Amino acid sequence: MSSDSQPGPDAPAVDAPEPDPQTTVPLKIEDWLTVLVMGALALITFANVLARYFTNESFAWTEEISVFLMIALTLVAASAAVARDRHIRIEYFSDSGSMARRKGLSRFGAVMVAILFTLIGTLSIRMVWDDYRFEETTPGIGLPAWWYSMWLPILSLGIALRAVGLFIRRGREA
């Protein structure tokens, strides 16, 4: 084998990942939040497994915190996916046709995502207010429920803003 690391002519081509788009708010925020949340989930789950193994008892709070972290992780990852234009779509339709058609479908998708998550964020504000006003507590450890629910409108509106940014970026492209 030769000393250089170039693939041979029969080697399959490997697609390099696309660089992140230029955004006003850096995508590193979502990337680091994803790392931190996944690390916290792994530590919590590992601690619970160790506790069960050595004591035959489970930490009551781990499930409650884990569910919250998985929801937060989903919303943070959705924000990054929207900003990178990697959200779910039917590629047969979105990647076929002229460039103008693809750009139009991308912008249409961005508008729909922005509307959906603005609606979710706006409606969930009422849920947070009700959790706060009625002093709802969580069933597992008795924390105020609004501590968890306040992140739904914040992250939903963040996703909506990322979709607006995608819409604007797609409009500026030639």
Image (tube, helix red, strand yellow):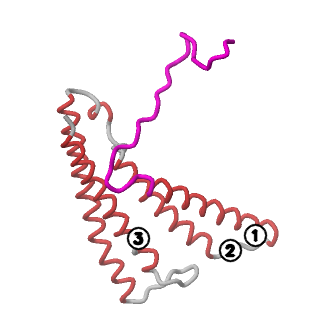
Q: Which residue corresponds to mark 2?
A: 59
Q: Residues within 10 Å of mark 2 (few under 14, many from 20)?
A: some
Looking at the image, residue 121 sits to the left or right of residue 149; the answer is left
The main secondary structure of the magenta stretch is: loop
Q: Nearer the viewer, residue 152 or 58?
A: 152
Q: Is residue 19 magenta?
A: yes
Q: Residue at x 60, y 63 (%)?
A: 40
Checking the image for residue 40, the label placed there is: none
Residue 79 percent across, percent down from the top left: 38, 55
Quarter occupied by residue 92: top left
Whichever of callouts 3 and 2 sits on the residue coming sooner in the sequence is 2
Residue 123 percent across, percent down from the top left: 28, 71
Q: Residues within 10 Å of mark 1 (few under 14, many from 20)?
A: some
Q: Which residue corresponds to mark 1?
A: 51
Q: Tell me the amino acid under the disc marked 3.
A: Trp
Q: Is residue 148 above or below residue 1?
A: below
Q: Tell me the amino acid under the disc marked 1.
A: Ala
Q: Nearer the viewer, residue 2 or 89?
A: 2
Is disc 2 in contact with disc 1, using a CB cutoff of under 8 Å?
A: yes
Tell me how far mark 2 sits from mark 1, CA to CA: 7 Å
Q: Tell me the amino acid under the disc marked 2.
A: Phe
Is disc 3 in contact with disc 2, using a CB cutoff of under 8 Å?
A: no
Checking the image for residue 151, the label placed there is: 3
Q: Residue at x 23, y 58 (%)?
A: 115
